[in-house]
Structures are given as structure tokens and as C-alpha cells.
Amino acid sequence: MTTRPYAAARRRLSFADKLYEVNWGLVLLIAIIASAGFAMLYSVAGGHLSPWASPQILRFLVGVVILVVVALVDVRVWMSLAYPAYLVSLVLLAAVVVAGHVGLGAQRWITLGPLGLQPSELMKVSLVLALARFLHGKSVEEISKPLNLFIALAMIGIPAVFVVLQPNLGTTLIIVADGVSLLFLAGLSWWWILPALGAVVVAIPTAWQFVLHDYQKQRVLTFLDPESDALGAGWNITQAKIAIGSGGISGKGFLQGTQSRLNFLPEKQTDFIFTNFGEEFGFAGSIALLILFAVVIGYGIQIAMAARSQFARLLAMGITLNFFFYIMINASMVMGLIPVVGIPMPLISYGGSAMLTVMFGFGLLMSVHVHRQVEIPRHSGGII
Amino acid sequence: MPVFDRKDKSRYTSFTRRSLMLTGGMTAVFAVLAGRLYQLQILDGDQYKTEAEDNRVNQRLIAPPRGRILDRFGVELANNRRNYRVLIVSEQATEGVAAALDAIAKVILLTDAQKKRVLHDVANNKKFVPVPVAENLTWEEFARINMHLPYLSGIQPDVGETRDYPYGTELAHVLGYVAAASPEDMKGSDDPLLSMPGIRIGKRGIEKTYDSEIRGGAGASRVEVNAYGRVIRELSREEGVPGQDVWLTIDRELQSFASQKLAGESAACVVLDVQTGDVLALASSPGYDPNWFNVGITPDEWKGLTTDDHKPLINKALSGAYPPGSTFKPAMALAAVQNGLKDLQVFCTGGLTIGNHQFHCWKKGGHGGVDLKRGIAQSCDVFFYEVARRLGIDKMEAAARAMGLGATTGIEIPGESSGFIPSAAWKEARYGVPWQMGETLVTGIGQGYVLVTPLQLATLAARIASGRAVTPRIAHTVGSRALPRPLPDPLPFSDEALAAVREGMNAVVNEGGTAAGFRITEPGFEMAGKTGTAQVRVITKQEHAGGVRKNASLPWNLRDHGLFISFAPVAAPRYACACIVEHHSDGHPQVQIAHDVLLFAQKRDPLKLRTAYPANAALLAPGESRGRG
């Protein structure tokens, strides 16, 4: 069987070829991780599929379809759609700030049809797409030119400002981290990077003084000394640490976690679901889950490295980093390493927007993989 | 290498290099996360397990039922009844305890004092401990609370138990009462029950003496609670030790009868079994309703109790110390016969002059020739001045002490006074002045320094009647343990002496003596006794000359105390009674009361009835009924 590999079909892949090229192992891995999430949603509901596990399963199945469909669409089509998607996301974000629903004290949702949608979730993917497209055409030298850098920073900064106004600090951090990582990967000169790092160090106290909301400051202060206010603002962190820590080596066993079942865990089905996992499956289970995440990330890096176009590389790496930032921030947060910033654990936490956008992101990653041999000229704008 | 463009080659190199740098960074982050998991779950895992357990499990104390107090026939004198109450759990009061109290005050009456107490209790207990807000609610109030419950956060309706004293005032001075534990109560004890909100402990009377037995031991319930403190399920339960019942020697019917006889007076009355010292009735008037203290006494009620000049809070039967007056004379008469003065004859002219001081007899004209029997019957002071002069204070003191005076009897009720019997040595030490003959004479008629309690007087009467050194005992059985009751020793007086005194006391009532108007006329129920009067004011020389004022013409608190000791039936005494009426009007109300009580006691004859003490139950043959006999 020497004919099947797509060297033979280098320019044009049939539908069947593409389906064959989808990395089904990665899809399986994602499904395994998502299943761990279903199990946790079943557990925190006290051993019931409702109210969380069954909608989540449904969303995941929808997500798998999205993933495959997105994967089969030529990566150049996505390149063409990058700027429009970014603009639409930006408009929706602006709409949220102006007229969004109020949920959890922050304006994050707008109603699109039957499901509440978080435009900030869309923006994470759109920004990666748009930046990848913008940076695709730039050589290493061009990227470090002030005008190009200004445009790129504006593409990151404008949505970041909208999101921080919602206010949603966690997502803002992820958007900025995604964007800056892409600039870094595209070859931004160290002469820009090092002074910028210095500026950030200076900016932190300023931000503390003028930008952060009181509740955000409180989160930081509480994080620094959670036990000082163990029944007030420190409650979340304290209880999350107790949940994870009490899991010990092998955990209390599936459905045996007491912290979530007895409502000691805040937001147990969303941001803090990892604590229930740690409680029920212990160190062994938590490490296993982290390894699964790491393998997915490894796949993403490998896909990025194997792509033949800068757009595809940046897109794949951006999606992968986005996934990584979610995990890093969520895990660090629930383990008391950083302040509580309200970021879900991808594939595990309950939530429609997050699940669909994560699966959409994996679809883009898979599209890069399927179309890894596609070459895109530097000054091409896609195929639409 | 997938490169198709020269420009792209440098980009690709840079991308790869920087991707690897980021990969290294991500690996480092994963290492940190794994390290943190190791720290939380392996290094500190045990500590967090404990904390999760502490989160999940609450230890709740279970108050054991308080033991009952029963009379000799098993009648419940103190028991527990259902108590509809409202508790608050502060951690469940989502809008704060103060707001919850305001909300509940719209449903039931809640005073500011109650609110203050609840806030205080809440502040002093853990957040999940239920604190009583209001107790002893009526069914209507309780139903209203339940109806409004959805709007009352942190409020728990509860049916608990509360102490109940069915006979209220009649037994207040015997039983005492229960009330919330004070900080002082908690200091001396490590019983976790004491810190339980709403717990009541014995504060007076039998409730206090046997509090640790009646209280029982705390049980504990380990319950799983959720983050809001709501109990999910019980993990384990350790039943407490129920409080033990205490059986008294009291006969409830006789007690009630005596109490009712004392009504309206500031008075006390004690009835003893002359052979055993069992207290059949111990009444002090006025009383108070011990249920008040349990429910929570109001400031007005408290003020009323503490400012009443009849002193309802004082158990006069054993805390009140009075000059015995002539009721002291039988003890002196015993000493006289024992010391060879059986045939003493004295001629009473109405007074006796020693040195330059005149000692009056109560009878202005004098009694003429008086022997021992007549001296007792007519209560001739001059006769007993002579007895005292001949005996001397030392022998008098010894006789008084032998009859149980001057020392606490050891009855199982706190607050007993020892009374007082003076001695020459005591006076010397106390005042630095030698004992005077005049003081001997005054002591001989029960005046001067001598002080006795009604309980001691009853003991005196019982000892004369039985010839044994009986001591009054009111507690018979605690739980299933009968308290030791050794047979009383014989008195250090000859039968001759005892017979002579009994004869004199018989004459007091039945042969035209000072209590002749109070004979028990029913054959076989006759009583013997001895009257006494205790002056509470100084009678001046002028008054003696012009005639001592009648009590009725004096303000209440300057009138004499009337005392009476007695036993019955004369032929074979079984009941002894002492009665004192403070500041009585003219006549002898205390003798009338003793007459009525002794007649009632003999007709009912509780000593002939079969007691219901647990030890008796063990003696019953199987199938035999446990009736009163």
C-alpha cells in the first residue's frame, strides 16, 4: 500500500483522503479526557446525569462533529475567514459590553439563538486565526518594524480591553498570552521583547492601583493568604485545596468525594471541577489526567512543526498554547498557586461556549494536520 | 524539511527554536503542577484529609433526659415535658443572626433581653451549634413559626424537653429548680453538657445536690453536614447516659397539705419519721414557682421574689435560724433528769432575781409550786432558770448538742444553717469576756445566743419521741442505689429522763398545758408537744411593769415568732413535727398547723403504706403488682 499517502495527492486531497488523514488517535485522546469530565459532572451531581453530565455529553458530540467538519475544510479557507471572524467577534464583544446579560457579576454573555454565547471565547480562536494570518505574510525583519508591531498589538489590545471591561480578567490574560506568544513565535526581535518584559514589571503596581476592580484585588490578597479569611473570600481556595489534598495518593474513589457532594466546593461543576477529580482519584488520577493533557499538547506542537506554511504553524501553535493556558491557569488556580480568575478546565468543566470553542479549536488544529502539506505563498490571502 | 521559500527558511528556524523554548516552558509548568499535586496530596494529604473530615463531620451533643425526682410512693415531683422551642443555627442564617431574630420577632413575641441573650450565645458557640431563641412556646406560636419557616433562614423549630414541676410552689424549697449554667458553673466542671446552649442544671435543692446524677452523661451524634451545616445523615450515634431518678422520703400528699396550711404566713413546717428521720414533709412559706426559673424568670418576677419581706426564696425550714424559746426546754429537762434533778421543785413568783437583775417568768403572777412535769406543761421560766443555774452552761450545751442542735443535720438539701449553741469557751474567745450566770439562765429558756432551725427542732422532737439519735434524711434512692441508712444510736439519756420529758410534753397538750386548746381529740391520735415564743424585740422594764404589748398591736416585723415541736401518737410516737410561724398574731397558729398536719399524717399514715422505692420492686415476686400497696 504505497499509493495511499498523500504524496500522490499532494495538491488535491479527496474527501476520503482527508477523512483518513484526520488524526483519530488525537480525537480518541480528546474523547477520553472529555469522558473524565462527564464522570466528574456525574459525580458532582450526586451520581446523576442531570443536570450537567447529559447536556455536556450532547455538546461534546456536537463538538466532535464540529471538529471533524472544521478539520476537513482546507486550511486556506480558514485563512480567508480569519479577518471576518475576528471582526465579527469584536462586534459581539462590543455588544456584550454595551448590552450583555449580567451573570456572576460580570457581563459576559449574549443570547444567540437558544444558547448563551460568550464572545470572549470566540475571540480567543478568532484572534489566533487573525494574528496567524497577519503574521503569515511577515518576515522576521518585518515583524519587528514598529508599524507592523503596532497593528499586531492593536489586534491583541482592542479585544483585550473589551474583555477586561466586562470584566473578565482570566480571559483577558489568555487573549494577551495567546497574542504575545504568536508574536514571539513569529520571530519578534529580542530587542522588543526584553524591554517589554521590563515595562510589565513596572506596570503591575500601576495596574493594581488603577485598573483592577476591588473584587479582583480581593482575590489577589486572599490568594496570598487564604487562611486569613477562611470563611469569607478565602473559602474557595481553602476548600479547593482541602478537596485536592484530601484525595491523597489514590483518592477517595469515584462518587466518594465529600467536598463537592456536600457543597464545600464553590462552582464545583465549572471552574473547580478539577478539585473533585483530585479528591476522587487522588495523586495517581490527577497526574494521569495531566499526562493526557500533555500528550494532547505534544500532538499540537508536533502538528505545528510539521506544517509547511507559517499560517498553519502559527495557527496550530496558537491553538495548542491557548489550550495549554487554560489548563495552566485553571489548575494553578484550584491548587492555590495563583489567584482565582474564573477560567474553566478545557474539556472537563461544564459549559457550552467553552466546549464548542475548544472543539472548534481542535478542528482547526486537525485541519492544519490534514492539510499540513499545503503550501501557502507569503503574500497569499487564502483561497476565498 | 517542509520549507519552500528562502525567506521562510529563517522564519521556520526561528519558529522551531522558539516553539522548543515554549515547549520547555510548558514542560516546566507541568512539572510545577505535578509538584504542587505531590505537595497537596502526598506531603500534606493527611492534614487535608483531616480538614475534609472536619468539614464533613459535626459532632453534636445529645442532652440526656434529666432524671425524675419522685416521692416515696413514686409520685413524680419533677419530670420532663415536651418543650416547643425555636433554635437558630448562625451559619444557616444567610442574612445574619440579627436579621433572623428581627424576622422571627414578627411571628412571635421576642423581647430585647432575649435577643441579646441569643446574640451572646451565638457569639460563644461554633457556627453550626443550634442556639435556643425561644422556648416553651404554645402550640399556636409553634405552628406559626412552622408556617413562616420558608422565610426564616437559619431557624429550626424543635421539640425538646424541659423540666416541669407539677406541684410548683409546694415543693419549691425541697426540689429547688434548674436554670442555665453560669460561667462559674462551667469553671469547675469539664462536662461538655454544660456548654451546650439551652442546657439547664440544678441550682438549688435536690436538683442541685444530686445534679450530677440527675443530669446524666452527654451522648454524641456524629453527623455528616453539607457546607451550609445542613445534616445529611447520621454517621454514628452514641446514646448518652440518661439521668438517674432520685427518690425522696417525702410524702407528696402530706407535703401539699402542710404547704397549704402555711399559706399566707412566713412560716416553716417539717414532719419526720421519728424512728428513721425520714423527712415526710418539709415546707417553707411563702414559696415560689420553680417553673419560672426554667422558663426564664422575668426581671419583675425576680424583683418580686427578692424584695418580698416574707422572703420566698429562703428555705426557712433549714436556712432560717431562730431563737428556740421554750421549745428548748425539753432538752434542758432531759439534762436535768439525767443530772439528778428529776424531783426538783421550784416556787415560781413570776420572777427570779440574780444579783441585781430581775429574770421574769412569762406569767406575771407566777406559777406557784412547779415540778418538772408542770414546768414543761406550763412552760415555767423560773423553773428552767433554776434548772439552768444548777446544770451550768457546759451540761446544757452538751444536752443541746446531743439532741441535734448547734450543728447541721446533714440533710441532702444545700444551704442548711447549723443554728447555734453557745458555750463559755466560745464567749471568751469571741468577746474576750467571761460567761455570765445571767446568760446561763437566759439560755435555759432558749433565749440569748441560742439559734435553731425548724429542721433541728423537728429532729429534737423525733429524738425525744424515739429515744434515738435520728438525723433527718430526705433522699432515699439515687438511680437504683439506696443511700445508706444506719440505725440511729440510742441517745445518751436514760429511759427515765425521756419518759419524764414525754410526759411533760403530753401534759402541754392533753393535761391543761400551754397548748391545751389544740388537743387532738380523736382517740389514738393524741399528740404531745411544746410551745415556744421567740422575741424579736427588746421588752423594756417599763413594758414589763405596765404589761407586755400584745402582738396584734405591733407592726408585723416586730411581733414574736411562734414555735411548736410535737410528736404523735403519744402512746407509740411515729410522727414528729416542728412548726414555726414568723411574727405571728395572737393565738398559736403554729400549734394549730402542727395539730392539723399531725392529724392528717396519722389518718393518712404514709409510714404504713408500702413505698415504691426501686429496692422494693426487686423484692416483689414475679407477677405481683407494683401498686402502692
Image (tube, helix red, strand yellow):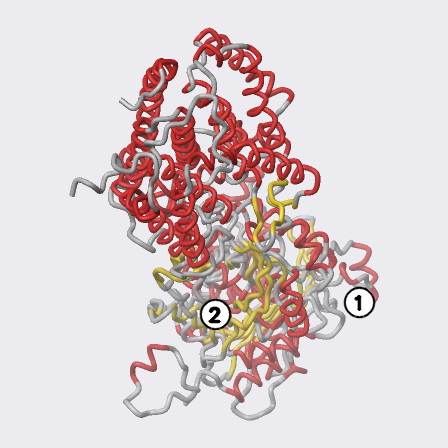
Residue A278 visible in this rendered orientation of the protein: yes
Point out the tag, 1 or 2, that comes first from the N-terminus: 2
Task: Establish if B9 lies above or below A233.
Answer: above
The residue that disc 2 covers is: B342
Q: Is residue B110 left or right of residue B371?
A: right
Task: Establish if B320 lies above or below A380.
Answer: below
Nearer to the camera, A219 or A306: A306
Of labels 1 and 2, the one closer to you: 1
Q: Which chain letter goes with mark 1? A: B
Nearer to the camera, A5 or A224: A5
Residue B370: percent from left, percent from top? 60, 72
Residue A224 visible in this rendered orientation of the protein: no
Task: Establish if B463 lies above or below A302.
Answer: below
Locate the N terminus of chain B and report the quarter of the image it occupies.
top left
Q: Which mark is residue B550?
A: 1
Nearer to the camera, A206 or B402: A206
Circle 2 packing at 10 Å, graded few (<14), some (14-19), many (20+), is some
